[in-house]
Image (spheres, rainbow, N blue to C red):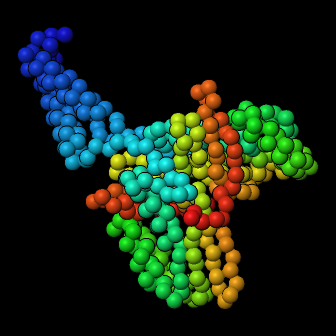
């Protein structure tokens, strides 16, 4: 490379490399990028799931786990035992027993009779409050979309419920589990 | 062929000078950005219980969002203008502009049909979705009771409220229904 013997070229190359390094360092340590967690990303029509924000404290872990767990509340009439198992794996044993009773009494007969496939989609999630490092109450916006009815796929998923639910999360052996799900009641705060 | 040999280093020098100028300009923009934008840090969300919340920035963000949600959905056909002014007082200038656009339609509907809307946040109906030292997003579920000529019905609305911290106050920057 005879051009590198040219002093001007060599100096300019050193300058370009130094300026590049400076730009990379400035961009990587930019306020608002390095210090703050990202905002939530909404679910979209193409099937990309909602991604919760990086919230500081134990509530952040609880919300992330709730967002991962709640889609398992969907069900498929072709594999109802599998649907139930997927849901209860995200729950405490106590709540899994309660949910199993509800599933067998309400969801299973309906799903089997109507040959339904229902998808649960999280549209938003946040922290209401925490108790210590191992208990958190989350608020989750949860849609239920009907994908199949009478065994046939629908041309477009049909929204069958748009709920606001309180989700109680508890941490057991380092893992956040669902300990209760209930609709937000129409009773104002005192 | 004899002229192309000295032309090549000149071209290279020109390219390098251009690249260097570009990189210096980018570095300058990044430095200016660093000085003009205050540091943004993630914050721990408020622990909002049924009994209330702390008087700190995270707690005030949730309180501001709850107030905004109830104000947004509380409109009386007899006081519609004042009701909407109360909402405008809670927003950033950019939000108020957007609100005014939709408010005219809402005001006309409320007045024409002689409606009274009252929004109330249920217990555990508000949660912090995102929080930094300067921005917040709060989910607020609102039960809205609509009354007309003695009859009333109540429906739930899921909202996502964006807030900016402006001179120590959380102001509404966006208000979206999560339909």
Q: Is residue A77 left or right of residue B45?
A: right
Q: Residue at x 26, y 46 (%)?
A: B38
Asked if one can make out residue A123 in the rendered structure from this viewpoint, the answer is no
Q: Nearer the viewer, residue A101 or A71?
A: A101
Q: Position of residue A187 (x, y in %)?
A: 64, 65
Q: Residue at x 67, y 60 (%)?
A: A185
Q: Is residue B138 left or right of residue B60?
A: right
Q: Position of residue A160 (x, y in %)?
A: 74, 57
Asked if one can make out residue A178 in the rendered structure from this viewpoint, the answer is yes
Q: Quadrant of the C terminus of chain B?
A: bottom right
Q: Residue at x 58, y 56 (%)?
A: B124
Image-quadrant location for residue A170: top right
- Asked if residue A179 is positioned above or below residue B49 in the image, the reply reads above
Image-quadrant location for residue A83: top right
Q: How many marks?
A: 0
Q: Is residue B92 left or right of residue B23?
A: right
Q: Position of residue A132 (x, y in %)?
A: 52, 38
Q: Residue furthest left?
A: A7
Image-quadrant location for residue B63: bottom left
Q: Position of residue A14 (x, y in %)?
A: 15, 20
Q: Nearer the viewer, residue A149 or A13?
A: A149
Q: Quadrant of the N terminus of chain B?
A: top left
Q: Residue at x 34, y 56 (%)?
A: B165
Q: Is residue A86 left or right of residue A62?
A: right
Q: Nearer the viewer, residue A11 or B97?
A: B97
- Asked if residue B114 is positioned above or below residue A44 in the image, the reply reads below
């Amino acid at each position: 490379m005879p051009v590198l013997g040219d002093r001007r070229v060599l100096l300019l190359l050193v300058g370009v490399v130094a300026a590049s390094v400076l730009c990379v360092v400035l961009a990587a340590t930019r306020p608002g990028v390095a210090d703050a967690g990202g905002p939530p990303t909404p679910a979209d029509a193409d099937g990309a799931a909602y991604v919760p924000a990086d919230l500081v404290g134990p509530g952040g872990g609880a919300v992330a786990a709730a967002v991962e767990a709640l889609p398992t509340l969907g069900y498929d009439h072709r594999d109802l035992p599998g649907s139930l198992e997927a849901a209860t794996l995200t729950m405490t044993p106590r709540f899994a027993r309660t949910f199993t009773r509800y599933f067998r009494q309400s969801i299973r007969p309906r799903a089997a009779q109507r040959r339904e496939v229902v998808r649960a989609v999280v549209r938003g999630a946040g922290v209401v409050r925490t108790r210590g490092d191992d208990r958190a109450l989350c608020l989750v916006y949860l849609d239920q979309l009907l994908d199949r009815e009478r065994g046939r796929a629908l041309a477009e998923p049909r929204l069958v419920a748009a709920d606001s639910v309180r989700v109680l999360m508890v941490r057991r052996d380092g893992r956040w589990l669902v300990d209760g799900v209930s609709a937000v009641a129409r009773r104002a705060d005192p | 062929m004899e002229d192309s040999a000295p032309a090549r280093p000149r071209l290279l020098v020109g390219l390098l000078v251009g690249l260097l100028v570009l990189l210096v300009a980018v570095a300058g923009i990044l430095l200016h950005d660093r000085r003009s934008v205050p540091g943004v840090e993630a914050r721990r969300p408020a622990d909002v219980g049924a009994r209330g919340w702390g008087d700190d920035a995270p707690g005030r963000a949730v309180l501001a969002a709850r107030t905004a949600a109830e104000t947004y959905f509380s409109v009386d056909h007899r006081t519609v203008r004042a009701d909407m002014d109360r909402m405008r007082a809670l927003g950033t200038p950019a939000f108020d502009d957007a609100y005014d656009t939709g408010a005219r339609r809402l005001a006309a509907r409320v007045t024409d049909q002689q409606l009274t809307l009252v929004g109330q946040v249920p217990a555990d109906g508000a949660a912090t979705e995102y929080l930094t030292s300067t921005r917040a997003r709060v989910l607020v579920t609102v039960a809205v009771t609509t009354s007309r000529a003695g009859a009333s019905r109540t429906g739930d609305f899921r909202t996502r409220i964006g807030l900016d911290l402006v001179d120590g106050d959380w102001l509404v920057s966006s208000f979206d229904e999560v339909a």
